[in-house]
């Protein structure tokens, strides 16, 4: 008898352990005796190769509240028939080949026998916007959402948001500097190769003021659920922000013991274009009361704003960085679905509080950040353009020995060797009139610009950058850049020998932080002094920058030039 009892208890304990173990290994609905409905798939309106984003009709049974996916990529449910036997969905824009899977709320599911393979359209990139340092930039075109990767100078950068006509790309982790030119290239799921976009400008990030409203109560509605009396009242016109309506709660407070109530947001605020998001709200408590709430993200994270507002009947605006001071875990602004949890904290036994609005603003709400304010100094330009040849009237033909040897665009290049501008629409070209001997130059046909009024002290290390393009099969060319200081008495030069065979090649040098070749005259004592220098003086204005085209040995002269620019640091 004792042995039977002992055995029965042992069996009972083991049975419970096995039962608990099996529950942990199965979906929750599998451990009930209820016959949960299982979606059935009998046919698909299409199979095999299908266009992304197209509609698909699924026939079967038990499609109520169903979710549909292909290899984890969720489809958008368009409609379900009244008898739950037909389900219409829109296919995702990006998915991997696989069966259609249908699951219901009971975690019961089925997969189709048929396999779907995505057919991607061709991608056309129409525009790559300037890249603000440390921020995101937009790429526009057709079907750009099926770009799988974007690269800045071959460095992969993440895609933040996607639509068929526009994607937003995060450049925050790429080391860039203002004035730089970069190449943006792509990897795509489309059948066509998407050409890279060269010469994308890196700029100072200018902030445009914006705000995203979470709650403002102007429609007279609120989402509070809990104890007390909650209403929407009028008369908050003295709150900055042109607000009239406000939320009014008069309820008991339990300190930290329990929650009086809560107000749940229903959407994730779109702050993808914000640079410096702040959580901003206006609150008021009656005289002698100190109502309070916590802000939560419905992901298990929360934050405090002191421990009781106690404004003595006056409106108070609180504006703090959105990403700071969170507790409970790692806050992710991309998943931020706001919630106000009305715990009284140290506010006592009365949870009395008015709220005019809760929103996310670009920067602190007290006016520290104004619309259009730049990050960085607005006194420093991204670049100083010396010559870009876009205004063709400023760059007439150069005539030597009665023959045109310099002209805007392709006139001086052989008809079999036309090119497009390096950047913009126009460039300048030099040809050969047969008058030059080996290493001789067009000294009477220089291109120059007066730079006396340009303040280069604003740049720690100003670079002169430009692009050259030698003719196909013409071999090395010879281009001299001559820089003058001290009313022309100091004459420094930098030589370039492009051999790009019909392609653009970029050239640059530091104006003040590298040795240059000295061509100063030394007939006088002061001339001899200038002749001994190896570098330009960064504390003295540059008088003039001049470009001379010469003949490299006996090679025929065919060379084009574009975009002479000064930037802080190298441009390319």
Image (tube, helix red, strand yellow):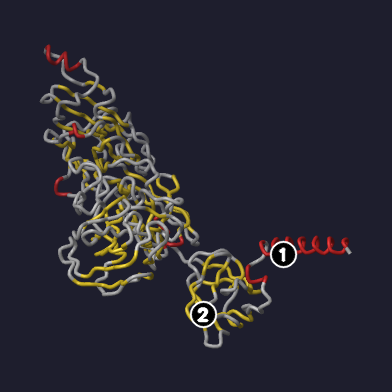
Which residue lies at the image location 27% right of the left edge and 63% below the top edge? 353
Q: Residues within 10 Å of mark 1 (few under 14, many from 20)?
A: few
Who is closer to the viewer here, 370 or 196?
370
Residue 407: quadrant of the picture: top left
Residue positioned most to the front: 2
Q: Position of residue 463 (x, y in %)?
A: 26, 34
Who is closer to the viewer here, 557 or 163?
163
Q: Position of residue 56 (x, y in %)?
A: 53, 77
**Quadrant of the frame with the C terminus:** top left
Mark nearer the N terminus (1 vs 2) = 1
State the residue position of label 1: 19
Which residue lies at the image location 39% right of the left edge and 43% below the top edge? 174
Who is closer to the viewer here, 470 or 137?
137
Mark 1: secondary structure: helix
Q: Is residue 372 visible?
A: yes
Residue positioned most to the bottom: 83
Q: Is residue 189 left or right of residue 380?
A: right
Q: Is residue 422 visible?
A: no
Residue 13: quadrant of the picture: bottom right
State the residue position of label 2: 88
């Amino acid at each position: 008898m004792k042995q039977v009892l002992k055995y029965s208890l042992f069996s009972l304990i083991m049975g419970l352990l096995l039962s608990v173990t099996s529950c942990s290994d199965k979906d929750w609905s599998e451990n009930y005796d209820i016959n949960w409905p299982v979606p059935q798939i009998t046919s698909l309106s299409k199979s095999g190769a299908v266009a992304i984003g197209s509609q698909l009709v699924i026939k079967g049974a038990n499609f109520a509240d169903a979710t549909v996916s292909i290899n984890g990529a969720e489809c958008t449910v368009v409609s379900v028939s009244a008898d739950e036997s037909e389900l219409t969905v829109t296919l995702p824009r990006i998915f991997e080949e696989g069966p259609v899977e249908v699951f219901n709320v009971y975690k019961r599911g089925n997969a189709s026998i048929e396999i779907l393979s995505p057919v991607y359209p061709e991608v056309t990139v129409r525009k790559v916007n300037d890249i603000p340092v440390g921020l995101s930039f937009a790429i526009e075109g057709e079907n750009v959402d099926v770009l799988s990767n974007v690269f800045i100078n071959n460095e992969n950068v993440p895609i933040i948001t996607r639509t068929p006509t526009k994607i937003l790309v995060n450049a925050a982790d790429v080391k860039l500097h203002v004035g730089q030119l970069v190449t943006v290239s792509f990897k795509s799921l489309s059948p066509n190769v998407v050409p890279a976009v060269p010469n994308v400008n890196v700029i100072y990030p200018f902030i445009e003021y914006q705000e995203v409203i979470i709650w403002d109560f102007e429609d007279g509605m609120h989402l509070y659920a809990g104890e007390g009396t909650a209403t929407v009242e009028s008369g908050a016109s003295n709150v900055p922000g042109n607000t009239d309506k406000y939320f009014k709660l008069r309820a008991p407070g339990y300190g930290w013991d329990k929650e009086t109530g809560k107000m749940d947001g229903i959407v994730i605020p779109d702050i993808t274009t914000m640079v410096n998001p702040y959580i901003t709200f206006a609150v008021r408590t009656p005289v002698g009361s100190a109502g309070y709430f916590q802000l939560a993200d419905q992901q298990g994270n929360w934050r405090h704003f002191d421990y009781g507002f106690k404004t003595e009947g006056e409106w108070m605006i609180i504006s703090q960085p959105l990403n700071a001071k969170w507790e409970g875990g790692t806050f992710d602004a991309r998943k931020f679905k706001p919630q106000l949890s009305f715990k009284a904290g140290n506010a006592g036994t009365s949870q009395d509080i008015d709220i005019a609005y809760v929103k996310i603003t670009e920067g602190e709400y007290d006016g520290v950040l104004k619309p259009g304010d730049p990050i960085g100094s607005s006194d420093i330009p991204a670049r100083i353009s010396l010559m870009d040849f876009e205004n063709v009237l400023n760059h007439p033909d150069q005539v030597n020995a009665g023959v045109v040897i310099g002209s805007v665009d392709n006139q001086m290049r052989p008809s079999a060797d036309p090119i497009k501008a390096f950047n913009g629409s126009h460039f300048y070209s030099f040809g050969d009139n047969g008058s030059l001997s080996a290493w001789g130059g067009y000294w009477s046909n220089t291109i120059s610009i007066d730079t006396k009024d340009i303040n280069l002290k604003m740049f720690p290390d100003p670079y002169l950058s430009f692009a050259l393009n030698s003719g196909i099969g013409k071999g090395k060319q010879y281009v001299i850049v001559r820089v003058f200081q001290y009313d022309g008495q100091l004459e420094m030069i930098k030589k370039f020998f492009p051999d790009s065979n019909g392609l653009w090649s970029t050239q640059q040098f530091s104006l003040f932080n590298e040795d240059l070749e000295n061509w100063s005259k030394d007939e006088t004592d002061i001339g001899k002094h200038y002749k001994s220098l190896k570098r330009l003086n960064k504390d003295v204005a540059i008088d003039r920058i001049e470009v001379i085209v010469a003949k490299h040995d006996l090679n025929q002269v065919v060379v084009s030039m574009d975009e002479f620019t000064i930037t802080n640091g190298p441009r390319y």
